[in-house]
Amino acid sequence: PATVPSARESAALASWSFIHDCFARVGGQEAPYTALDEADQSRPRKRPHDGSELFASEARCQSMVQINVPCVAGDNLWLWRADHWLSDQYVVYNHENCCNTGLHVSKNASHVTMYGLFVEHTLSDLTLWEGEHGTTFFYQSELPYDALDDKAAAAKGHASFVGSGYRVGDGVVNHEAHGVGVYAFFRDHDVSVKVAVRAPDAEGIVIKNAFTKYLNGGPTSYIAGKGFDCRKEFGRIESIIAKGSRVLGRSTDSDKNKRSE
């Protein structure tokens, strides 16, 4: 982590740094390639365009972007844990391409502002904001398609998904977020997320225009020539915001538009 400059002052233009038009992807064109792939003969061994060997590696990280100094402004960041690979020919399952958090704003990083922040499919809190006086304008996130419920996680030796779309750290007392969207498509397992946005119950924390959206859900089946067919039965976000122990906003379960039996 970088050392916090003692001279930084949010009112002074010279104190500020900028990050803009940033795209991060965990899971490259060839990832994942794991021990599971070695055992599964249906997985590709060669690149489709030239027949050369794939790299024997899997992409992984703790956070895609971490900010450790105050007075940073970000504009147009898309932080993506890849849900497919090899030009959409193969889908990612079982928490492969492991990445916990898209954006982590550390306790050292006060006065950070984000304009247009997009985080998708990570396996814990998609955004974790621990610095004071942070502000976000327009946030879009999508929870992981391959999230594991308790039963599936135990069978595979992984941790189940317990993350949220946007989380303000427990010790923070000043934070603003305007326009916060958290979407859900639980393709593989019937996962229930308690709350989309988590924050302490402090007067200085303001979350405006937050919403959730149920996009789709499993169980899925593959139809040759058409792709995946989803039955819209899996998954729910139970509430929109939790400020401390106070839960605000109704469940998105009624938005499922489930198919009739």
Image (tube, rainbow, N blue to C red):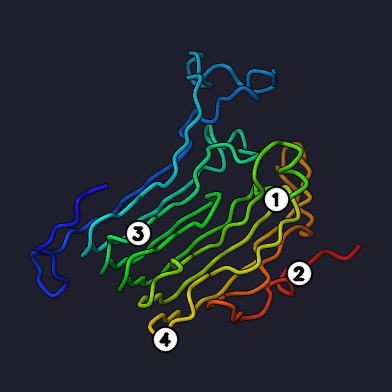
Residue 86, image x and y in percent? 53, 31
Classify mark 2: helix, strand or loop: loop
* C-alpha span from label 4 to label 2: 37 Å
Residue at image mark 2: 257
**Of callouts 2 and 3, the N-terminal one:** 3
**Of callouts 4 and 2, the N-terminal one:** 4
**Of callouts 4 and 3, the N-terminal one:** 3
**Which of the 4 quarters of the picture holds residue 213?**
bottom right
Q: Residues within 10 Å of mark 1 (few under 14, many from 20)?
A: many
Query: What residue type is disc 2 on?
Result: Asn
**Of callouts 1 and 4, the N-terminal one:** 1
Classify mark 4: helix, strand or loop: loop
Residue at image mark 3: 105
* C-alpha span from label 1 to label 3: 29 Å
Of labels 4 and 2, the one closer to you: 4
The label on residue 187 is: 1
Say whether residue 70 is left or right of residue 212: left
Query: What residue type is disc 1 on?
Result: Arg
Of labels 4 and 3, the one closer to you: 4
Residue at image mark 4: 203
Residue 139, image x and y in percent? 43, 67
Mark 4 and 2 residues: CB-CB less than 8 Å, in contact? no
Q: Residue furthest bottom?
A: 203
Mark 2 and 1 residues: CB-CB less than 8 Å, in contact? no
